[in-house]
Amino acid sequence: MSDVLRLQGSISTQSDRGAPSGDPATITLIDETVYLQGVPLTAEYHLIADLAQVVALGPLASAGFVMVKARGGKVKARITTTDGATQAVPVDSFAVWISDAVPVTAIDLTRVAGVETWVTVILGQLA
């Protein structure tokens, strides 16, 4: 069983003065489609301690699709890939990674000290 995951939408900017004549808007369309082995794994984490919280990959061998949404405060996501390097990435408040060739093999999350934070993580193993 597999799922098709689509990330669709747009990124745009608009003047805070409305849309005056001749003021260009920047629009970038997003249309990413990835094919997953099985269904995506969704998890919620309530970070109430300052220690790193390991994100369980569950049945996934690796994740070619990773989405992190932090609420309440920012988090530091430490990500290890098949390249072997662990990298710390600040998430304030939303991040998405799609990687065909270098999937994620481990993730942990650390909140800002003393800041109660809720985090939603969606992981998908690419087909």
Image: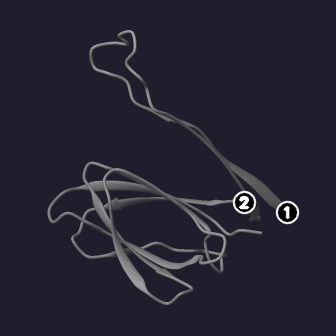
> Measured from the top left, where is residue 125 in percent x and y?
68, 69
Please give the residue where the numbered disc 1 appears in the rendered image. Answer: 1
Kindly indicate the quadrant of the structure image that contains residue 48: bottom left
- Helix, strand or loop at label 2? It is loop
Q: Which residue lies furthest to the bottom in this view?
A: 84
Residue pictured at 39% horizontal, 30% vertical: 13
**In 3D space, how far apart are the residues under numbered discs 1 and 2 (Cα atoms)?**
8 Å
Q: How many marks?
A: 2
Is 122 placed above or below 6 here?
Answer: below
Q: Quadrant of the C terminus?
A: bottom right
Q: Left of 76 or right of it: where is 22?
A: right
Furthest toward the left, the residue is: 114
**Tag 1 near tag 2, CB within 8 Å:** yes
Residue 51 spot, x, y in % from top left? 25, 76
90 versus 59 height, above or below: above
Tell me the SS state at disc 1. loop
How dense is the environment of label 1, judged by Cα within 10 Å: few (below 14), some, or many (20 and up)?
few
In the figure, 113 relative to 85: above or below?
A: above
Q: Residues within 10 Å of mark 2 (few under 14, many from 20)?
A: some
Q: Nearer the viewer, residue 48 or 24?
A: 24
As shown in the figure, which amino acid type bears the numbered disc 2? Val
Quarter of the image holding residue 47? bottom left
User: Circle 2 sits on which residue?
Assistant: 39
Write the residue at 49% across / 90% down: 84
- Inspect the image, locate mark 1, and give the three-letter code of the amino acid beneath it: Met
